[in-house]
Amino acid sequence: MISRRRMLQAAGGGFGLLGLAGALDAAGVIANPHVVAKAKRVIFLFMNGAPSHVDTFDPKPALAKHEGQQPSGKLYKKSSGSGFMPSPFEFKAHGENGVVMSELFPNLAQCADDLTVIRSMHTNVPNHEPGLLMMHCGNLQPIRPCLGSWASYGLGSENANLPAFVALSGGTPVVGPQLWSNSFLPGEHQGVAVDTNDMNVEKLIANIRHPSLSRPQQRQQLDLLLQLNQLHASQRQQEGILNEQIEAMELAFKMQSAASEAFDVQLENEQTRQMYGDTVFGQSCLLARRLVERGVRMVQVYYVTKGSKQPWDTHSNNNDGHRKLCADSDRATAALLADLKQRGLLDDTLVVWTGEFGRTPYSQLDKKKDISKAGRDHHHTAFTTLLAGGGVKGGFTYGATDEVGMHAVENRVHVHDLHATILHLLGIDHTQLTYRYSGRDFRLTDIHGNVVHDVIA
Amino acid sequence: MLRVSSIIALLGCLAICSTALADEATEFFESKIRPVLIERCYKCHSQEGNAYKGGLTVDSREAIRRGGESGAAVVPGKLEESLLLDAIRYESYEMPPDGKLPDEVIQDFETWIRMGAPDPRDEKTVPTQERAKAEIDWDVARQHWAFQPPQPAVLPQVQSAESCQTRIDYFVRSQLQQNGLTPNNPADDRTILRRLYFDLIGLPPTAQQAEAFYAAAKANRTEAITQLVDELLASPHFGEKWTALWLDVMRYAEDQAHIVGNNKELFFPNAYLYRDWVIQSFNNDLPYDEFIRLQLAADSLTPEDTNDDVALGFIGLGPKYYRRNAPEVMADEYEDRVDVVCRGLLGLTVACARCHDHKFDPIPTEDYYALAGVFASTEMVNLPLNEEVEVEKGQAKNPEDSRHVIRDRDPKDLNVMIRGDVNTKGELVPRRFLRALTEHDPQPFSHGSGRADLAECITTSTNPLTARVIVNRVWGEYFGTPLVRTTSNFGALGELPTHPELLDDLAFRFMENSWSLKWLHREIVLSATYQQSSDIIAEKAKVDEANRLLWRMNRRRLEVEQWRDALLSVTGQLDASVGGKSMNPENVEEHRRTVYAERSRFQLNPLLARFDFPDPNAHAAGRVQTTTPLQKLLVMNSPFMNAQAKQLETRFAELEDNSARVDALYQTLFARMPSEQERHLALAYLENGNWHDYGHVLLASNEFVILD
C-alpha cells in the first residue's frame, strides 16, 4: 500500500505537490514481478509450539529398532529422557504419488495430491522465541519486518478496501505482535491483528462500526466533514496532503462495509462452517479463506488458544497432545485446501503449514519418569513443513532426514530458503525486495536463502 | 663414483617417476577441478575478477590454501580441515549458493585433496588477506564532507536583506535567488500562533491565548512574536514536546520484546525517571554536550548525583534479548548499544561494520569492536531507589524499587568476531574511538569501560558530526524535511545537505552558544524562513515542487502526540502536570500528555502504532508518515474519539444559542471565527444532527490535524 507519495515521504521528502492520482492506491513497490508469479496470496498456518515431525509427516520405523538408545553426537541440550522413542502412530502412503503421513491426518490424506511435504527443514536454534522470529522475520532478534509485511510492502493489497496483511489468532502466541511487525517498514505494512476467539464482526475488527450512528446517518455526518474539508482545501490550493486525508476518510467509510462483509463467517452456509470444524482454529481458517478470496495478500493463522500460547509444545503427553491437536488441525487444514480448490483459488493461493521447528525423536520425561506421559523436546536440525497450492508440486515429498529423524540430510531447506521460495512463488526475487534502512538495504533473507526450485511445479 | 652415479641414477628415476605422477595429478586438476572452480567459484572468489567474497579467492594455489576469513579452504591431504569441502557439501556454508554441485564433482574434490591438492597455478598478485581487507586512505577518507568540522560561513549577499530576520534567511534566500525563486510572504497571525504553539510546546493555543496574541500583534507584530517565542520556550511544556523526539532516538521503552511467561524481571518499571530527566534537561536548557556526557557516563562524571544517574537510561533502558548472557546474544546487544550511540548521536551506521568492514564508509570492523568493547565492559543494573529498598548483590531485589542504569564491569577488549561470528575470533581490539573521526591514530580509552572517554570524543567541539546531527534533527521537526534527509546517516550513502553552509553555520554557532538547544530553537523560529506562509504558488512550484529550497513553509500533519494532546486540550480535559509514570493513551480516563504514554517493545499501543509511532526495539531515525483508512476508522468510530466528541459537547453545553456555540467551537479548535459558509453548514446539519456528531466532525477535520 505504499504510494509514490509515501515513498517520497519515507525518503524524508516531506509533502510534495504530487497530484491526487494514486495517492492512496493499494499497490506495492514492485510494479512488475521479478519472476512469473504463481501465487497471488498466502495463507500461513502456524502450529505454535512446534509439531513433532516423526509423529506426523516423517515416518521413522528405525526408531523402534533404536528405542531406548540415547542419541549420540553433539546435542543442543542433553537428553534427559529414555532415549529414542518410536511414534505410536501408523503411517501410510496416500494419493497417487504416495505421500506418507500418520494416521493423525485422515482428512489431509484426502488432499495428499495437493501437498508438497518438505521433510528436510532446519533452523538455527531450538528455542521458541528466536525460532518464531526466524520463521517470521528471518532473524533471531525482534528488529526486522516479518514475511507478511514484506509481502505487503512488495505487492500491496489486491483490494484497497481491505488491509493487505491480517494475522488471525485465538489468543496471543509466544512473542506475539513482533510476529506481524512491520519493524522499520512504514506502519501501513503492519499485520492487522484479529483475535478470533469471538467471531462476532464487531469484536473482530477494532472500530469497524460507529457505536450509535446508522450507516445513512454516518454518511450524512461524513458529508458535512467532506464539505468542510473541501472548503478548507480550496483555500489551500488543493494541496496533496489535504486531499490524501479526504480520500482516506472516504476509503474508510467503504472499508466498513467491505470489511464487515469479509470478516463475517456467519455469511457462510452451515455445511461449509461445519466442514472446517467448530473450533477457533477451524473458524479462523474459514475466515482466512474469506479474506484471501477478497484480495487480502497475506493471512497468518496461529494455532493458539486462550489458555495456551503454544499448544503444540508437547514436552509431556506428546502422543495424546498430538492426537488432539492434529484432529483439529487436520480437519481445518483439509477443509481449507478443499474449499480453496473447489473455488478455483488453490492454484494461486499458497498455503503453508508449519511450526517454528520440530521435536526430538527421543523422549523427554519429567521427574516421575513416567514413560506413558513422555514428551518430546524442541528440535531444530530437522522438521517438516507442508506447502500446498500457489504453484508448488502436488503429491510431492522433498528432502529427507537421517534414519532416526535427528538431522535433515538430503536436500536441506533452511527457513531462509523457505522464505526465498515463498517470495519467488509470489513473483518476487528475494534478493531484490529491499528497503533502505540504517545505511544499507535490508531484505527478508538477509544475505541468505536459495529458492527451492525442486518444489515448484 | 659408482655409488655417486647410482645415487644420481636413483635420483633421476625418482625425478622421472615424480614427474609422471605430477603430470597425472595436474591432468586431474586441469580436467576435474579447474573447470569447476572457474565456472562455479571465480565469479565471487577470484583475484582476477576482483571478487573477494568472505576474503576468499580460489584462483591460485596459495590463495586457495590460505583461504578466507574463516580459514584455509584447502589443506592438502586433509579432508576434515578443508573448509571448501564443507562448503560444497552444504555442511557449513552452502557453496555455490545457486545450487549444490553434483555428488560426483564433490567426490572429485575429495580425491583431489586426498592426492595433496596438486595445483600448478602460481599466485601473481599480493596475498588475499591484505587485499580483502579495506585499504583505507585515511587522509582521503576524512575529506568526506561530514568529517570536516563545520565552519561558520560568510553571509551570502541577498537582494531582500532587509526582510531577513536571522542568518538562516540569508542562506535560504541565496539558494532561492540562484534558482529564480523568492520566499513566500509572512504567514498570518493565526497561522504563526498555531505553528509556534504546536512546534514549541506541542499544544494548541487556547481561545484566550489566541486573543491576547492577536491584540499584541496588532500593536507590534515582531515584538509580539518574539515575546510569545520566549514565553513558550520558558514553558514547562516545552520539554515535554521535544522529549518525544529524543525518546525515538534512544528507543525508549519500558519492557522487552521477548516475554517469557509473566517474567517481568527484565522490564523497566521506573523508566519514566529517565524520561522526566530528559524533560527537565530540555526545560533547563542543559547544554547538549553535557546532556550526552551524562547519558553515557553520569556515573563517573557526577557520581554523587542520583538525579543525573538516571540519565544513564540512554543505555540502561536498551533491549535485553532472550537468552541474554549467551555470548551470541550479548553480541546482539552490543550492536544495539553501538547503533544507538553511532546512528543516534553521530549519524553513522557503524553497526554495519559488525560482520565486515563498512562497505561505503571508512569504518573497518575493528572500529566496531573498539566501541562494542565499551559496552562489553558495561552492565545494566537496577540500583535501589532509596535506602529502604531490599537489596541483593548490590541491586534492588524488585525492579519496581530501582532505577535502571549502567555501571562498569571489569573492562575487557573484544576480539573482532569474523563475519560477526562469536566463535571465530580475529585480532584483539583496544577500546577506542572511531578512526575516521580522530585526527591521528585513536588512543585506547583509559578510564574503566571507556564510556566517559567515548562521551568526550563525541562531544568535543572538534567532532564534526555531533552538532550537525542534532541541529539537523531539530530542523527536521520544524520544517518536516531535515536539511540532510537521512538524519541518522551522514556517511557516503547518506544524502547531502540541501543547504550545506546553513547546516554548518547553525552547527558551528550552536557549539559557540554553549550547545544551547533553546538558542537553536529560537534561532529557527525567529527566522523569516520559518515564519513564511505555506501557500502554494504555482510558478514557484513549477521550479521546486518538493520545496527543497524552502520557498514556502511545509504543511505538516500533527504527530500523534500533538494530535491527542490537542484533543484533550480543546475538550478541556488536559491534565497539564509535568512528569511521572506512564499511562495508556487510549484509556479515556487518562488525560495526561501523550509523551507519558507507555512505550512497549512487546506490543506498541494500537493508538500510537496506528499513527506511525516507531518501533522502540531499535533507534528510530525519524517518523515515516502514512495515511491509511485504518487511521480514519479510528477517527470515525473509536470509543476514544467518541469520548472526545462527548466531552466537547459537554464543554459548551451551557451556551444555548446554536450560532454562539459554533463560534465557540471554532475559536477553541481553530483560533478563529467560522466563515458564513461554515456557520451555514453547521446550522443546516444541526437541524437533524446533534452536537456530539457535529463536534466530532470538527475534531476529525483536516484543519484540526494539519498545520499550515
Image (cartoon, coloured by chain):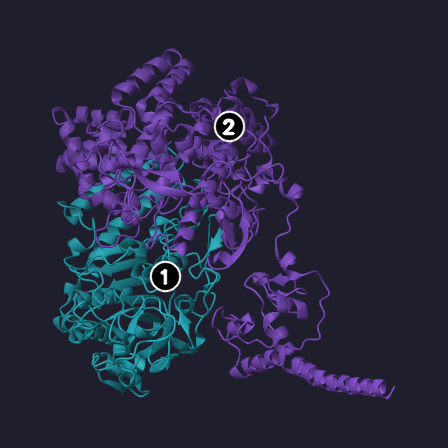
Chain colours: A cyan, B purple
Q: Is residue A81 left or right of residue B420?
A: left
Q: Is residue B239 left or right of residue B669?
A: right
Position of A288 compared to B649: left or right?
A: right
Query: Where is the C terminus of chain B found, in terms of image quarters?
Result: top left
Evaluate if marks 2 and 1 touch, with contact meaning CB atoms under 8 Å apart: no
Amino acid type at mark 1: Met
How far apart marks 2 and 1 lie (CA) works out to 52 Å
Q: Quadrant of residue B132?
A: bottom right
The secondary element bearing badge 1 is classed as helix
Q: Quadrant of residue B32?
A: bottom right
Q: Quadrant of residue B153?
A: top right
**Residue, disc 2:** B183
Q: Secondary structure at mark 2?
A: loop
Rendered location of residue B1, percent (x, y): 88, 86
Residue A345 percent coordinates (x, y):
30, 72
Q: Is A423 situated left or right of A339 in this image?
A: right
Is residue B657 in view? yes
